[in-house]
């Protein structure tokens, strides 16, 4: 009779974390930057149909990096949770914090109980009615939730990108400045043009549904300015 | 957070999601007949060169009493479509709410809005779902209108209680005053109306319906309550401001006074 090998729990967790981190690092990164009228979400993405950034609810957006099928499943679950809550209670009762906690529960559960952790990092962003109400929740593959204030960086190479943003970020950027900053941080010493970026905004002044996708032409115009 | 296995996934259907998660409102499937609930009345829609005009009066009645003076029966469904409802006000408002949510839910889950035909079909299924309640007097009969971005034209649909869906080419009317309203439109309608002519005819039809049908409310200049009138064109849904409607109705009053 063969005995199963004993593997220390520390080792199991470490292996899973390494596995998830490696999977995430293979994909391209995204950043979210606050600007004067909301939050700009910018991802490096050459596909114009398989989105990393999308709308969850009136004031809430979702961003995901890593394995597409995994974060897309989480995105749809988020849309469902938000729409159900808005239907049962009121549209005002749907908030990013509660969604972020639910995402953290799922990711944490999968990380500790399943064979394979989810190879994703996600962002739940909510634009406030006033600038100081903006919220960015960054959730890691193991369910760790981080509440970030000014900007958020997801995906591989996050440390280098964060270092590049940190130096140049200042509160009250214009949209063009925020998108320019995000592009520069994502690109590093490469060049990235509008076609290689996926850009969306949560705009305070966009009416009930704050989420708006920017076309390549609009992004080009912003970057040119 | 609702998660489903791939074979069991409700897809982009919000009503289906409500059923799966047990949130769906219990439908009225038993109980007494002739419940005295508020009823919403006359709504019309007609096509013009750039799209469609929808209009509906503001009155809701319970038997011979006026229960609301300011009800809005013509509402925006999404950016390029609107829905107008006549019938039992409670189920009608719930149906509109669910319909609006379904269109938005689909758009978010799929990342792309439904086609206009798809939206009309969705509404048809919702009306059919209400059939059991309709048999007990909770009849809901909507009009659906919108701008079809693929064809570049405005389109209209009318429904019956069983969910039957009929596309009309010129105009539709629903509710207790619909006979009068549709006759007014029928006599004066010309293909190729511009926005102003279409808005004027829609308002005139509601005026005549209110004149002959006690359940339809006319413009209430005293309280400043005017019918809801909206246009849907390639630039989307636009509700007319009361100031513009006041002018239209003043000119209708002048016309009627000469009569």
Image: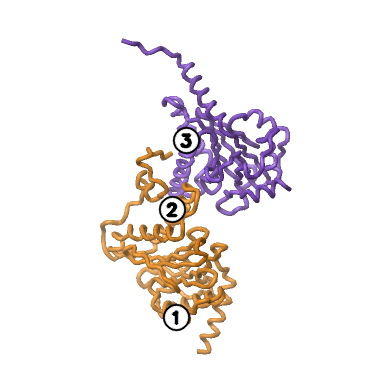
Chain colours: A purple, B orange
Q: Secondary structure at mark 3?
A: helix
Q: Residue sitting at 67 percent across and 35 percent down?
A: A187
Residue B243 location (% of width, % of height):
59, 71
Residue indicated by mark 2: B102
Gap in Å between the C-alphas at discs 3 and 2?
24 Å
Q: Residue sitting at 73 percent across and 36 percent down?
A: A168
Q: Secondary structure at mark 1?
A: helix
* B188 sits to left or right of A201: left
Chain of the residue that carries numbered disc 2 in the rendered image: B
Structural crowding at the residue carrying mark 2, measured as other residues with C-alpha within 10 Å and reported as few (<14), some (14–19) or many (≥20): many
* Discs 1 and 2 carry the same chain letter: yes
Residue A188 location (% of width, % of height):
69, 33
Residue indicated by mark 1: B184
User: Residue B257, relative to residue B192: is it above or below?
Assistant: below
Indicate which label's residue lies in the foreground, 1 or 3: 3
Gap in Å between the C-alphas at discs 1 and 3?
57 Å
Q: Secondary structure at mark 2?
A: helix
Disc on res. A70 = 3
* Discs 1 and 3 carry the same chain letter: no
């Amino acid at each position: 009779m063969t005995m199963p090998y004993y593997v220390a729990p520390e080792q199991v967790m470490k292996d899973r974390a390494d596995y998830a981190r490696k999977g995430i690092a293979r994909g391209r990164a995204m950043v979210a930057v606050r600007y004067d009228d909301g939050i700009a979400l910018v991802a490096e993405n050459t596909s114009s149909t398989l989105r990393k950034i999308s709308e969850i609810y009136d004031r809430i957006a979702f961003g995901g990096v890593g394995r597409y099928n995994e974060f897309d499943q989480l995105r749809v679950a988020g849309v469902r949770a938000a729409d159900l809550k808005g239907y049962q209670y009121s549209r005002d009762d749907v908030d990013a914090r509660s969604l972020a906690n639910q995402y953290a529960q799922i990711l944490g559960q999968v990380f500790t109980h399943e064979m394979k952790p989810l190879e994703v990092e996600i962002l739940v962003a909510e634009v406030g009615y006033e600038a100081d109400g903006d919220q960015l929740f960054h959730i890691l593959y193991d369910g760790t939730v981080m509440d970030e204030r000014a900007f958020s960086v997801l995906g591989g190479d996050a440390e280098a990108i964060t270092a590049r943003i940190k130096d140049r970020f200042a509160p009250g950027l214009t949209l063009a400045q925020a998108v320019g900053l995000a592009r520069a941080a994502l690109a590093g010493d490469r060049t990235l043009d509008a076609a290689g970026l996926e850009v969306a905004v949560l705009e305070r002044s966009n009416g009930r549904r704050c989420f708006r996708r920017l076309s390549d032409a609009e992004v080009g115009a912003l970057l040119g300015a | 957070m609702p998660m489903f296995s791939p074979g069991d996934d409700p897809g982009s259907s919000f009503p289906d999601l409500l059923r799966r998660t047990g949130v769906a409102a219990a439908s009225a499937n038993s109980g007494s007949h002739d419940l005295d609930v508020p009823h919403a009345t006359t709504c019309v829609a007609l096509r013009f060169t750039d799209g469609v005009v929808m209009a509906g009066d503001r009155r809701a009645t319970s038997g011979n009493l006026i229960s609301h003076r300011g009800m809005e029966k013509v509402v925006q469904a999404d950016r390029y479509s609107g829905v107008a409802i006549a019938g039992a006000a409670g189920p009608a408002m719930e149906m509109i709410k669910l319909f609006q949510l379904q269109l938005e839910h689909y758009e978010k889950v799929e990342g792309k809005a439904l086609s206009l035909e798809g939206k009309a079909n969705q509404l048809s299924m919702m009306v059919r779902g209400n059939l059991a309640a309709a048999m007990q007097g909770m009849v809901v009969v909507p009009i659906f209108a919108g701008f079809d971005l693929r064809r570049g034209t405005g389109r209209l649909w009318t429904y019956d209680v069983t969910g039957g869906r009929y596309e009309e080419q010129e105009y539709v009317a629903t509710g207790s005053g619909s006979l009068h309203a549709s006759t007014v439109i029928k006599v004066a309608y010309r293909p190729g109306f511009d926005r102003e002519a279409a808005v004027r005819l829609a308002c005139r039809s509601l005026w005549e319906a209110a004149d002959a049908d006690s359940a339809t409310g006319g413009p209430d200049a005293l309280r400043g309550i005017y019918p809801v009138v909206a246009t849907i064109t390639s630039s989307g849904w636009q509700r007319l401001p009361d100031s513009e409607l006041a002018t239209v109705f003043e000119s209708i009053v002048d016309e009627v006074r000469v009569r």
